[in-house]
Image: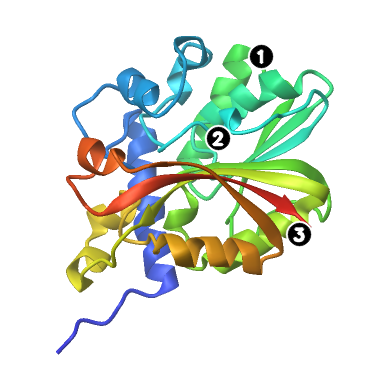
Amino acid sequence: MKKARKNAGQIKKIVREGYGRIASAGTGCSCGCSNTSNEELAKTIGYSDKEIKTVPEANLGLGCGNPTALGEIAEGATVLDLGSGAGFDCFLAAKKAGKTGKVIGVDMTRQMIKNAKENAKKYGYKNVEFRLGDIEKLPVEDNSVDVVISNCVINLAPDKSKVFAEAHRVLKKNGKMLVSDIVLLKELSEWQREDKKLVVGCVGGAVLKKEYLKLVENAGFKVKILSEDKKISKSQYQGIPLESLKIAAYKK
């Protein structure tokens, strides 16, 4: 008899608790668990030394890419980060948006929000704010954001269609979404889907690449694939058939 799949509430509880532990520890074994330091891991997925040193405490060794490098973030832009963690990508986006811009980070883990706010205060980021919330139901107004970014987080959401619909809702006309995420190249086994470590580790909740792209398009976006990192499978995910997909999606 097959074991019943976890429901959305159970999945969110597992993810929230997992990232709460990571936030408290100040380092992660998630989205590519390895023995590599946070700094070295950040370099392998596209961050420069200068970016890593911006707010070092915010780099928890998470992520599968550098979304702020996937497209232009103009000065004065309002940027939204889905699953902002300790604020690493928010602070990088804030530098690009400038003093006239604004960055909003949304995360469902209280400890992550606490850490992010402390980092913002310590480094003087006055154009960044962090909100506790679910990326399937964003605490953000309609048509209020120029750019949505996300780094290896949407795979964690049980209902990805809601995430993309919410991103479309909050984006202004002609707004864009820059995303780096884990997608599958082959379906997982039932035990992999059920494994809590793989769920927190950005694998258990991931979907096939074709399905992922279809979900983005169905939300009303025009999608452009920017790059696909298949090497990450062996370097960080023990050979599980997956890749780090980087896309730009434009609101129609």
Task: Say left or right for 190 vs 155.
Answer: left
Q: Identify the mark at residue 169; answer none if there is no mark.
A: 3
Q: Earlier in the sequence, mark 2 or mark 3?
A: 2
Closer to the camera: disc 1 or disc 3?
Answer: 3
Residue 174 placed where, x, y %? 82, 48
Closer to the camera: disc 2 or disc 3?
Answer: 2
Q: Identify the mark at residue 207; answer none if there is no mark.
A: none
| Amino acid marked by disc 1 | Gly
| Amino acid marked by disc 2 | Pro
Residue visible at 37% across and 68% down?
A: 10
Mark 2: secondary structure: helix
Residue situated furthest bottom in the rendering: 1
Residue under label 1, please give it: 124
Task: Say left or right for 186 vs 119.
Answer: left
Question: Is 225 in front, or is 76?
Answer: 225
Mark 1: secondary structure: loop
Question: Does residue 184 appear anywhere in the picture?
Answer: yes
